[in-house]
């Protein structure tokens, strides 16, 4: 009986505690060093261009919510760069899985 409770607790911890972004981009000194997930080619090219013109280090994560995609930036990325990445993000390429909030 105790093992059932432990398995349930581990399952709940995994569902809540594990970070599962749809897309993760890692930048270091103005270069895209690693990406995990489906990276649209135009978005990847735009991000590389932004990073090349204004070098920065940090991570960009894309999470899917009911309302659509949500971008999350690490603290190492300046606000101006964050806005430029938001401007080139293809919201149509990332479909939401739920109903849109009205």
Image (spheres, helix red, strand yellow):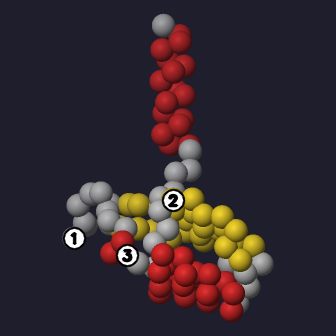
Residue 65: x, y in percent? 38, 60
> Which quadrant of the figure has residue 92?
bottom left
| Residue toward you, 80 or 25 | 25
**Gap in Å between the C-alphas at discs 2 and 3?**
15 Å
| Residue toward you, 25 or 63 | 25
- Circles 2 and 1 in contact, beta carbons < 8 Å: no
**Gap in Å between the C-alphas at discs 1 and 3?**
18 Å
x 47%, y 58%: residue = 22
Q: Which of the two marks, 2 or 3, is nearer to us in this view? A: 2
x 53%, y 37%: residue = 14
Q: Which of the two marks, 1 or 3, is nearer to us in this view? A: 3
Left or right: 60 as drawn, with respect to 39? right
Q: Which residue ends up furthest to the top in the rendered image?
A: 1
Q: Which residue ends up furthest to the right in the rendered image?
A: 29
Secondary structure state at the residue bearing disc 2:
strand
Q: Pointer 1: what residue?
A: 102
Residue 67: x, y in percent? 32, 66
Secondary structure state at the residue bearing disc 3:
helix
Q: Pointer 3: what residue?
A: 91
Left or right: 49 as drawn, with respect to 54? left
């Amino acid at each position: 009986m105790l093992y059932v409770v432990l398995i349930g607790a581990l399952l709940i911890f995994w569902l809540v505690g594990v970070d599962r972004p749809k897309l993760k981009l890692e930048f270091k000194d103005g270069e895209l060093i690693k990406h995990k997930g489906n990276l649209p080619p135009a978005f990847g090219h735009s991000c590389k261009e932004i990073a090349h013109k204004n070098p920065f280090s940090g991570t960009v994560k894309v999470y899917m919510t009911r309302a659509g995609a949500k971008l999350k930036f690490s603290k190492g990325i300046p606000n101006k760069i964050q806005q430029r990445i938001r401007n080139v993000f293809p919201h149509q390429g990332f479909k939401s899985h739920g109903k849109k909030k009205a």
